[in-house]
Amino acid sequence: MNLYALARPTMQVNLWASLAYGVFLLAAPDMFCNLLKAESVNTAWLRTIGAALLGTNVVGSWLWLKNPSLDMGRVQTITAGLEAFAMALSLLLGEFTAENIWMVQASVALAFIVTLGLYSSSLKDYYNLEA
């Protein structure tokens, strides 16, 4: 498959997955912890993460889908990559307390897949193809 063909569908995945996670974390962090069977020690952080997902990933992806631009493509790719790195590091360091750790692992895998799929949206050549 052409790397450049992945940008738009991956940006849609980024938008919808971030919307789901963001709303869930912002509105019901305790329920999210219950689903993961994790300690709900400080759910304020989960609400903050939910708000960040909605602001950066959802709005950013929507803006890119509406009017693709190199700068917004780079923001989305870097954001996805940083999120994947941070979650993977926390997973490796044993910082997640979830009993349903497979849900965390699936989220980390999705974050890496999204980062790879968005990579072409951070390249100048992608926008030259559309012109």
Image (tube, helix red, strand yellow):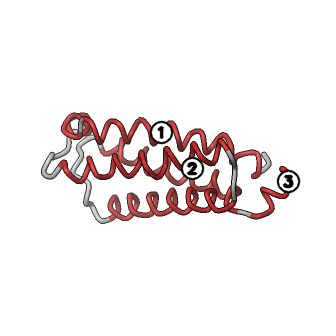
In front: label 1 or label 3: 3
Residue position for label 3: 129
Q: Residue at x 85, y 53 (%)?
A: 129
- Please give the label number shown on residue 104: none
Q: For residue 10, which quarter of the picture?
A: top right
Q: Position of residue 125 (x, y in %)?
A: 80, 62
N-term-proximal mark, 1 vs 3: 1
Q: CA distance from mark 2 to mark 3?
A: 21 Å
Indicate the amino acid at tag 3.
Answer: Leu
Q: Position of residue 110 (x, y in %)?
A: 50, 46
Q: Residue at x 27, y 36 (%)?
A: 27
Indicate the amino acid at tag 2.
Answer: Val
N-term-proximal mark, 2 vs 3: 2
Q: Are marks 1 and 2 in contact (CB under 8 Å)?
A: yes
N-term-proximal mark, 1 vs 2: 1
- Please give the label number shown on residue 114: 2
- Position of 43 with respect to 113 (left or right) is left
Q: Are marks 2 and 3 in contact (CB under 8 Å)?
A: no
Q: Residue at x 38, y 40 (%)?
A: 21
Q: Secondary structure at mark 2?
A: helix
Dot 2, how many residues are within 10 Å of its Cα: few (below 14), some (14-19), or many (20+)? many
Q: Position of residue 25 (x, y in %)?
A: 30, 41
Dot 3, how many residues are within 10 Å of its Cα: few (below 14), some (14-19), or many (20+)? few
- Position of 37 with respect to 114 (left or right) is left
Q: Secondary structure at mark 1?
A: helix
Residue position for label 1: 17
* Rendered position, 74 above or below 23: below
Dot 1, how many residues are within 10 Å of its Cα: few (below 14), some (14-19), or many (20+)? some
* Rendered position, 15 above or below 85: above
